[in-house]
Image (cartoon, rainbow, N blue to C red):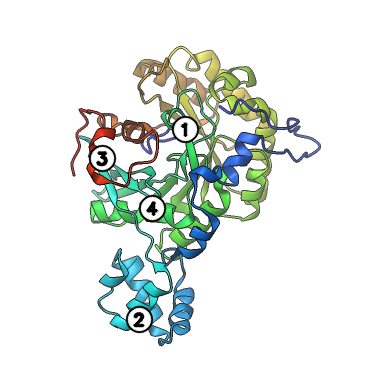
Amino acid sequence: MLSISMALLHHCSTPFSRAVRPSPPTRVRLSSTMAMASAEAPSSTRLSQSQQQKQQVLLGLSEKELQELALNLGQQSFRGKQLYHLIYKRKVKEIQDFIQLPQAFRNDLEKSGWKVGRSPIFQTVTAADGTIKLLLKLEDNRLIETVGIPVEDDGNSVRLTACVSSQVGCPLRCSFCATGKGGFARNLRSHEIVEQVLAIEEVFNRRVTNVVFMGMGEPMLNLKAVLEAHQCLNKDVQIGQRMMTISTVGVPNTIKKLASHKLQSTLAVSLHAPNQQLRETIVPSAKAYPLSALMSDCKEYVRETNRRISFEYALLAGINDSVDQAVELAQLLREWGHGYHVNLIPFNPIEDSEYRRPYRKAVQAFADALESSKITVSVRQTRGLDASAACGQLRNNFQKTPLVTDPDNLETQLPNTDLAVTG
């Protein structure tokens, strides 16, 4: 999903077990595809448990936890405060570069298996409008995308939004989404989500003001790590909860789980269709999570959290962008509550897609029809069209399988591209 945040995510050909009904509440088992994603990828595509146990990462630890670590390694607690400052304020990437700390402490950290948890930037692509998309190369040589979107507000202040990924690829394979076409490898660990925001701040040399979990992957299939990253971004990177948005195409039972955390962040639900039949063709996983069940969960979410939901709607020319479909969407939303907001996203063209971007006139007519039905609506400003902006596009240009470790062989894996690459 990503277009100002480069929007569009989320085929799950294997069904869930019996579909959820809005009443009475029914727990739904994840299908084999979704269960695999939420429990991490197959063993062949992820680090072994013993390897992960050895990888102790500083990024993501709170100030208190870093103080405890310092004490455990024979240092005074103020060294933990220094660690905290170096990681989150100075954004230092390597332990040996913590020059304010004693050499013995740095050595002890490394001997104990600790590392900062920052990944190198593999590629940077800059669009004419200032949007910058980064590819980060993870420790297992997988590539993930993150996007920085600068927007000048009234008064000449600049808002910088980081659009972050939650998975390496996505198992849901929504028909319009580039990420799904690139396949699915594994869930991201929480620090791999947090580091995307720090990388954006590093490239722009300014603080990120907003974070949207709308990059590669389905956040609700990696909810534990997403919530851990959310807490770190709020408490340690110091981004307000109301400045963050968690997006989902809809995964059974997870909206209820998210509601129980009482976050002050926005939930964005990707609808993309006003009825079940059409939605199944665009979002195949909808076959196992009927629209009525999804809307029931959304209604309960609003009741429990008192937070408005934003419904994302990718406009696909000739598929879901007619005025009649706008009226049908308004009727659906009124049936399930009030105060909802619809965010219209004109399709970001991707390679080998049968879908087309609608004309501006069609987008405006759709928005006008919603407003006439008393539905609050906005049209997302498309950013970075010249930077492979749609979610997953840039990553697919560079990686179908893990990158080779040997840099001498790397050149053979990179296709020719006319992207405006900088760096």
Residue under label 2, please give it.
105
- The span from disc 4 to disc 1 (Cα, nearest Å) is 19 Å
Q: In the image as oriented, which residue stretches furthest toward the top?
A: 318
So how many labels did they put on this image? 4
- The span from disc 1 to disc 2 (Cα, nearest Å) is 42 Å
333 left or right, relative to 120? right
* Amino acid type at mark 2: Phe
Residue under label 3, please give it.
409
- The span from disc 2 to disc 4 (Cα, nearest Å) is 24 Å
**Earlier-in-chain disc, 4 versus 3:** 4
**Earlier-in-chain disc, 2 versus 4:** 2
**Earlier-in-chain disc, 1 versus 3:** 1
- The span from disc 1 to disc 3 (Cα, nearest Å) is 23 Å
How far across and down, in percent of the image, does residue 156 sit?
Answer: 23, 48
Q: Is residue 356 above or below residue 56?
A: above
Quarter of the view holding residue 338? top right
Q: Residue at x 44, y 19 (%)?
A: 316
Q: Which of the labelled discs sits on residue 183, or is there none?
A: 1
* Amino acid type at mark 3: Asn
**Residue 168 visible:** yes
Q: Residue at x 43, y 45 (%)?
A: 212
Q: Quadrant of the N terminus?
A: top left
